[in-house]
Amino acid sequence: MDMEHRIRICEVGPRDGLQNEPVPISTAQKRLLISGLIEAGLDNIEVTSFVNPKLVPQMADSRQVMARTLAKVHDPDIRLTALVLNERGYDYALESGATSLATLVMVSNTLSERNSNMSRDESLALTRILLRRAREDGIWMRVYIGTAWTCPYEGDIPPNVTIGVAEAVWDMRPDELAIADTIGHAQPLEVGYLMKDLVTRFGRKKLAIHLHDTQALGLVNAAAAIHAGVRLFDASVGGLGGCPFAPGAAGNLATEDLVFMAHKMGFETGVDLAKLWKVVQLAKGFVNRPIGGRIWPWWEAHARPASELPGIT
Amino acid sequence: MDMEHRIRICEVGPRDGLQNEPVPISTAQKRLLISGLIEAGLDNIEVTSFVNPKLVPQMADSRQVMARTLAKVHDPDIRLTALVLNERGYDYALESGATSLATLVMVSNTLSERNSNMSRDESLALTRILLRRAREDGIWMRVYIGTAWTCPYEGDIPPNVTIGVAEAVWDMRPDELAIADTIGHAQPLEVGYLMKDLVTRFGRKKLAIHLHDTQALGLVNAAAAIHAGVRLFDASVGGLGGCPFAPGAAGNLATEDLVFMAHKMGFETGVDLAKLWKVVQLAKGFVNRPIGGRIWPWWEAHARPASELPGIT
């Protein structure tokens, strides 16, 4: 398919979406969620993270989620990714059979220290090690560039600093670079500015943007990124998510909002909104609170009456 | 103030926002709403419409609203506008003391016929008459170009048709041209395309955009219009509104969402969000249903705790 007409989506609901949920979600529920997402057409899913279960109890079953999901999914075109933040997590992920990983560098030195007890430079050195091991092991690996625009402690991050960190990581040859508005405080002019610059530097194939909807600007920033040439977006079903270590971060860009807008703009996504609606209903039952993107009220009333939707299976 | 750094807002809540509300709003409530809006810094307000009270009962008190509001507001920099759709409405508006008016042409011939029993050409001829009278009477007058992108009956409107109607009206020398996404089905690529073209033709000073948030794309389309050079936006406090004669139209772009985003992007609006919050609470009490822009949940929790806000006066 012509890339100009396709928006690719990396679904981060099962990982970024759930990690902050106070209600424990069982391994079986996570697997139902993941198979529902695949059923809806999402072929690129971050399913779990191999991190300290004391800090992120919701991800304590990462081995089971990874191994059991892989055992069920045989389509080589479906990518199932796990987040790792150190070599130990990397080892565990590989033991569980993972072949796609993600790791993270914070542009903000302050948040890097608070989040991982590493300076930004130490985090960059670790990323270099992880990427070298991944290449040797035949593992696909993306790198998140966190706090690309704003940090809860440092405030606005100057674009040249983010560009510098992105270039340093790019030189380590990751398979993908995901520029993250970690706390969801970015605005469209700065999103457009930075992403246009990065698309020019790196091309659009390996460049993703990871947005949060904290200030109701998730879709606005997504549209600005599309305008800047970005064609690969992280999103979370139902708008689940947030960052447990970054105050003020709540709600990823909802997959359904991104899909709806992308389709309206004439892009293909491969995602079926009616099937995604069912996954949102499923997730709602698991987290036991109202969730769902901004598009549902209109969609349920006009595009596809709820009465016509099949029940949750 | 440098226009590049200012987003001007035409507040349409008391007219477009209320016209479709099933709960009757009293003249006194409307005047409270209007004074709250002025207090919050909005200096350009569409306060009522002189239309058939049988079709739009909520606007039956237009004479009182116009006359009593004018009697209270002595600041010559505050513009109070009334919508008129024919010469009779024009006469009534002038009798009530109005000096600023708006009128409407639908690009969609079908909606024009259904809405006003006039073809688009008849509507253009009437607009020419109204604008000629306005010039003779020293009345300021804006013209809405309705269904600029989509019509509930005709579907997508080709941009060349909208451009043709806009040029025909522009040649009649209106004081302002407001390009309206009447049913809120436009998407950012087509909003950006058309508005960039119109900014090039007409400049930005007299060109407004009127957006609805029906499909949760109100802010996205506003950002696309800002990107295209538009600096004058219609918006409705609390996201009140819709078009009673256009199926599927619900909710104008909320003034608070536009103000919040504009401020984040570095534009000035002259509007105080804390004061606007109070007006939303006031309007909520009048319409007796939940209203409010998409920004409030974050804003109330983080930007300004509700406990710190003064009570409604």
Image (cartoon, coloured by chain):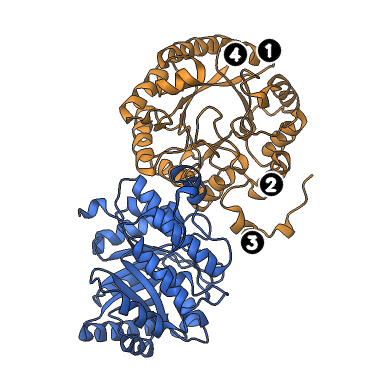
Chain colours: A orange, B blue
SS of the residue under disc 1: helix
Residue B168: where, in percent of width, then height? 29, 75
Cα–Cα span, label 2 and label 1: 33 Å
Do discs 1 and 4 belong to a common subunit? yes
Kind of residue sitting beneath label 3: Ala
Residue A90, numbered label: 4
Verify CB contact (< 8 Å) between mark 4 and mark 2.
Answer: no
The answer, for residue B147, to whether it is visible in the render is: no
Verify CB contact (< 8 Å) between mark 4 and mark 3.
Answer: no
Residue A301, numbered label: 3
Marks 3 and 2, the one that precedes in the sequence: 2
Marks 3 and 1, the one that precedes in the sequence: 1
A292 over B41 or under it: above or below: above
Do discs 4 and 2 belong to a common subunit? yes
Q: Closest to the observer: A162 or B59?
A: B59
Residue A95, numbered label: 1
Cα–Cα span, label 1 and label 4: 9 Å
Kind of residue sitting beneath label 4: Tyr
**Circle 3 marks a residue in which chain?**
A
Do discs 3 and 1 belong to a common subunit? yes
Mark 2, residue position = A275
Marks 1 and 4, the one that precedes in the sequence: 4
Residue at 38% over, 21% down: A165
Do discs 4 and 3 belong to a common subunit? yes
**Circle 1 marks a residue in which chain?**
A
